[in-house]
Image (tube, rainbow, N blue to C red):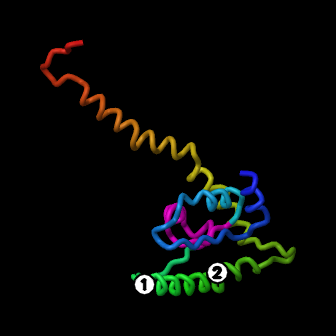
Amino acid sequence: MHISRYLVQGVDVWLNTPRKPNEASGTSGMKAAFNGVLNLSILDGWWAEAYDGRTGWAIESKVEAHDEAAKDWVDAAALYSVLEEEVVPLYYDRDRDRIPRGWVEMMREAIRTVGPQFSARRMVKEYTERYYVPALRDVLALAAPAAGEPNCE
């Protein structure tokens, strides 16, 4: 935690380029977004769920290659394209006061939306509602006597 605090300070873009489908949990990108850092990542792992175009950018390669080296080239070209056409122009688009208003708005959106969507609170609530409670119901249903059977307790 101590070291990661220094990793996100002063960062403008969190670049994440895993080979699909090898994304880990993505907690570093989430932590960056909680701190107003914009994500630039392959659409894999948490970013595939979080990406909406308002809190960062997706590195999307439309070509599916079976050859890892070929896939890396396609992904690199997609990365450079997003950097040149979207990330860099937005970063340097400054107003009279030299403030990148569009960039700052994306930072605010990341803080406002990514935190609640990827918080431990949301995860625990969702797991409880979608998995734990239904599993408990199934267990209780199996343990309950069938209709018409006497309860031997």
Residue range highlighted in magenta: 38-57
Q: Position of residue 43 (x, y in %)?
A: 51, 70
Mark nearer the N terminus (1 vs 2): 1
Residue bearing mark 1: 67
Please, is residue 8 above or below residue 116 in the view? below
- Label 2 Cα crowd, 10 Å radius (few <14 / some 14-19 / many 20+): few
Asked if the stretch drawn in magenta spans residue 40, the answer is: yes
Could you tell whether 49 is left or right of 110 in the image?
Answer: left
Nearest to viewer (mark 1 / mark 2)? 1
Residue at position x 67%, y 78% in the image: 87
Give residue 86's mark.
2
Residue for point 20% across, 15% down? 151
Res 28 quadrant in image: bottom right
Element type where label 1 sits in the image:
loop
Q: Residue furthest right?
A: 97
Name above or below for residue 127 compared with residue 71: above
The quarter of the picture where residue 55 lies is bottom right
> Is 103 positioned to the left or the right of 26 in the image?
right
Point out residue 61 in the picture as x, y percentages from the top left corner: 48, 81
Q: Please say if the residues under marks 1 and 2 sit with CB atoms less than 8 Å apart.
A: no
Which amino acid type is shown beneath numbered disc 1?
Answer: Asp
Q: Viewer-proximal residue, 103 or 146?
A: 146
Q: Residue at x 45, y 43 (%)?
A: 127
Callout 2 amino acid: Glu
Dot 2: element: helix
